[in-house]
Image (cartoon, rainbow, N blue to C red):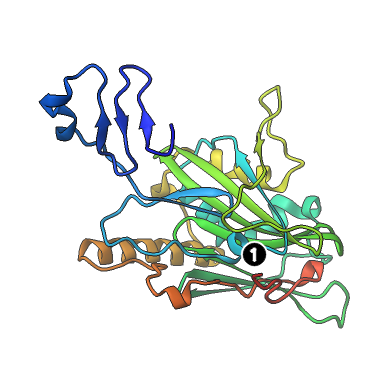
Amino acid sequence: MDEEGIRCPYHGWKYDCTGRCIEQPAEPEAGGFKDKIKHIAYPVEKLGGLLWAYLGPEPRPLLPRWDVLCWENGKRWLEKHEIYNCNWLQPMENSVDPSHLYWLHGDTAHLAPTIDHYEEEHEFTPFAHGIMKRRVTPGRKPGDPPIVDQHPLLFPNTLRHVFREKLLSGSVRHNLQIRVPVDDAHTQVFVVYFTPNDADHSPADGDTPWEYFPIRDEKGEYRLEHVLVQDAMAWETQGAPTDRTREHLGVGDEGIILLRKLVREQIEIVKKGGEPLGVVRDPSKNRLIEFDVINERVGLFGKQQKVA
């Protein structure tokens, strides 16, 4: 690969960034055979340390400049997770399923409320980029105000969150959890982290350090000391994909029901030639898309950072 394009290592055919064949070393130049060859090519943009390809019809929309991808005054880094053995919709349904928090994660993530029985209120509000999830938990002591946790599912396959490395102390970590379908039974997860600080500078279009994150240890066991792996265990053990015809949905599944309804609605919109939720075309609205993320359990609230 060079500035002109990419070359096949088998016979040396070379293609430019549009997929047009520009060299065929073993073919006569005068024959013009290369001019009849065109490979499938997709436009790609670099943002937040990731390469984003657009696979849809033209005219293509703008790549959303979400806050964690574009903030620069701080440290950004990536995790590429081991491929999950589940359909991509299972992680996304988890994103609007707050009632699992108390039971699956508990004190591992310093999340379980200090009450003697389960008691939470949940709200799910559709907005321009997906679904805003809001959890209200009773205060830790009698008379304390309720504790609010609010963050969005960015339709269709991303969760935006914020937390601290340690409860009520340590660095703030904003993150985007991007769930990319590999096929019907496998999902690739990328997590983009950003910690605001005065010492680091992370250009939105620059290179970003990354690391591979295995969800299993050398024995093939889940690394359940990690919160994201606790979720992965729940996603995978549902089946790949889960058989939803055998479900019994209740009041606690309100967010999942809303997400499925939204997915069906957006599919019908696209079938009729419309544009799905979250498409951005106005550059003036895409310089920086910030979200009102609240996590009062660890003392975090509001928009945390401004773009440089």
Seen at 57% across and 65% down, the residue is 252
Lateral position of residue 106 relative to residue 260, left or right: right
Lateral position of residue 285 relative to residue 296, left or right: left
Does 88 appear above or below 163?
A: above
Residue lying at the far left of the rendered structure: 31
Q: Which residue bears the numbered disc 1?
A: 71
Of the 4 image quadrants, the one containing the C terminus is bottom right
Seen at 42% across and 39% down, the residue is 3
Residue 218 screen position, x and y as percent: 71, 23
Type of residue at label 1? Trp
Of the 4 image quadrants, the one containing the N terminus is top left
Q: Is residue 98 in view from this perspective?
A: no
Residue 11 screen position, x and y as percent: 30, 17
Which residue is at the front of the view, 292 or 33?
A: 33
Q: Quadrant of residue 135?
A: bottom right
Residue 171 screen position, x and y as percent: 82, 59
Residue 158 screen position, x and y as percent: 52, 57
Seen at 55% across and 65% down, the residue is 66
Lateral position of residue 269 relative to residue 79, left or right: left
Q: How many marks?
A: 1
Give the structural element (helix, strand or loop) at label 1.
loop
Residue lying at the far front of the rendered structure: 30
Does 11 appear above or below 196?
A: above
Which residue is at the front of the view, 58 or 255?
A: 58
Q: Is residue 58 in view from this perspective?
A: yes
| Label 1 crowd bin: few (<14), some (14–19), many (20+), radius 10 Å | many
Q: Quadrant of residue 16?
A: top left
